[in-house]
Amino acid sequence: MRSANPVLDRLEDVGRTERQVLGVGAVESMTVADVVSRTVGLLLLTGVTAAIAWVVVPQAWWISAALAGSALATLALVLFISLKQVTNPAVIAGYAVLQGLLLGVASRAFELVYPGIVAQAVIGTFGVFFGMAVLYRARIVRATPRLARLVLGMLIGIVAIGLVNLVTYLLTGRQGLEVYSLTAQVGWLPYVFSVVAIIAGALSFILDFDLVERSARAGLPRRYAWYCAFGLLVGLIFLYWQILRLLSYVRR
């Protein structure tokens, strides 16, 4: 069974190939604790960078262009790390820094319009994350092939529809399933889209927890703890954006 998170879905194949080439016991195996410590470190790096960007980067006319450039750079880096299965901590830390810059500047823009919304989004994001961790540990929600297919289909649909919606907005100025203006009125469809995205993001953690745990038991090389931590960071940031957007709709 694969993870619904595309960053992690090929981990088992990678581990199996490396064990065949190098031999079992030839390299130190990763543990769940390794993934946890690296995830925490990346989150701290992202948070510190976001805080610095929040304070240092001024609100100016070029901010929108800078945000667009940063978003494209982070997307390119996600694709590079995922497709190349990069485990270099410097490259992964670079992603965390770029995302921190983007989060810091964009979050402040939301905060200026809706005071207190960033704290609400952060609390909501980690609340969902730890809630899914509890459900997973208690085996209340289990990682099954059916759940994997469902979540993967939802995430692919969300990304595809989001890209179509963005292109339509850039070409025509019309806002559909996602509303990009911070003050425009919101119909019922954007609410539904945001809720579906949050549910998909939350459920993907169940599959990711399961894959990380099974990969550790299977003896995946320790350097892949960075890769796992990167995947979890991508999921957390995705969830944060969805919750932040939904809260902005509610606050209108």
Image (cartoon, rainbow, N blue to C red):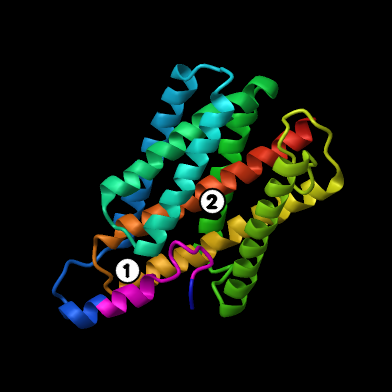
Q: Amino acid at mark 2?
A: Phe
Residue 173 at what x, y percent from top left? Answer: 77, 38
Residue beneath the point at 56% across and 79% down: 145
Judge by depth and name the residue closer to the eye, 58 or 73. 73
Judge by depth and name the residue closer to the eye, 114 or 120. 114
With 220 as the anchor, is 128 left or right in this view? right
Residue 144 at what x, y percent from top left? Answer: 56, 77
Q: Which residue is mark 1?
A: 216
Q: In this rendering, does residue 24 appear at all?
A: no
Q: Amino acid at mark 1?
A: Ala
- The magenta segment is 3-17
First in sequence: mark 1 vs mark 2: 2
Q: Does 8 appear in magenta?
A: yes
Q: Which mark is residue 13?
A: none
Mark 2 surroundings within 10 Å by alpha-carbon count, few (fewer than 14), some (14 through 19), many (20 or more): many
Q: Which residue is mark 2?
A: 129
Judge by depth and name the residue closer to the eye, 26 or 123. 26
Location of residue 252 (image quadrant) = top right
Identify the element where label 1 is drawn: helix
Residue beneath the point at 35% across and 63% down: 84
Q: How many marks?
A: 2
Q: Does 179 appear in magenta?
A: no
With 7 as the anchor, is 117 left or right in this view? right
The answer to whether the residues at label 1 and label 2 have Cβ atoms under 8 Å apart is no
Identify the element where label 2 is drawn: helix
